[in-house]
Amino acid sequence: MGTRYSFTCSRCTYSAVVSGGPDAGMLASTRTICCADCRALYDVFVGHFSEPDKEPPRCPKRANHRVTRWHSGDPCPRCDEPLPQGEGVLGWD
């Protein structure tokens, strides 16, 4: 079972509910990405549970956007302030 957490920037108040890194449910594997063009965080499908990281991470808004893998504590996508992990708010399968 995967878990999503709340992340809120204390400097610019940007907020997102994402896993904060690689995560997996019963059937799917996801990864948190930072899209440089959207300036936002997303959890994206990267493969089935048995084959994590089979699919390259892509922005859900536009496939040609520049994305990087993002982990809890990495910089805010809007202001580069460290983005600490908050409470778990959503469990998923």
Image: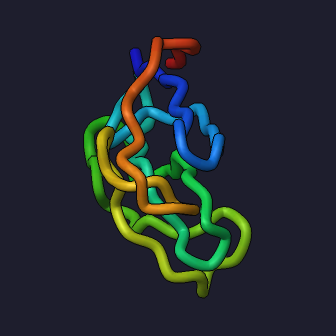
**Tag count:** 0
Who is closer to the viewer here, 63 or 85?
85
Residue 35 location (% of width, % of height): 54, 68
Q: Quadrant of residue 21?
A: top left
Who is closer to the viewer here, 27 or 75?
75
Q: Is residue 77 left or right of residue 47?
A: right
Residue 92 location (% of width, % of height): 53, 18
Q: Is residue 84 left or right of residue 51?
A: right
Please name the colour scheme applied to the rendered image: rainbow
* Quadrant of the image containing the N terminus: top left
The residue that appears at 55% across and 53% down in the rendered structure is: 41
Residue 54 location (% of width, % of height): 32, 61
Q: Determine the residue located farthest toward the right in the rendered image.
A: 61
The residue that appears at 46% across and 12% down in the rendered structure is: 87
The residue that appears at 43% across and 30% down in the rendered structure is: 27
Who is closer to the viewer here, 15 or 81?
81
Q: Determine the residue located farthest toward the front in the rendered image.
A: 11
The residue that appears at 30% across and 41% down in the rendered structure is: 73
Q: Quadrant of residue 50?
A: top left
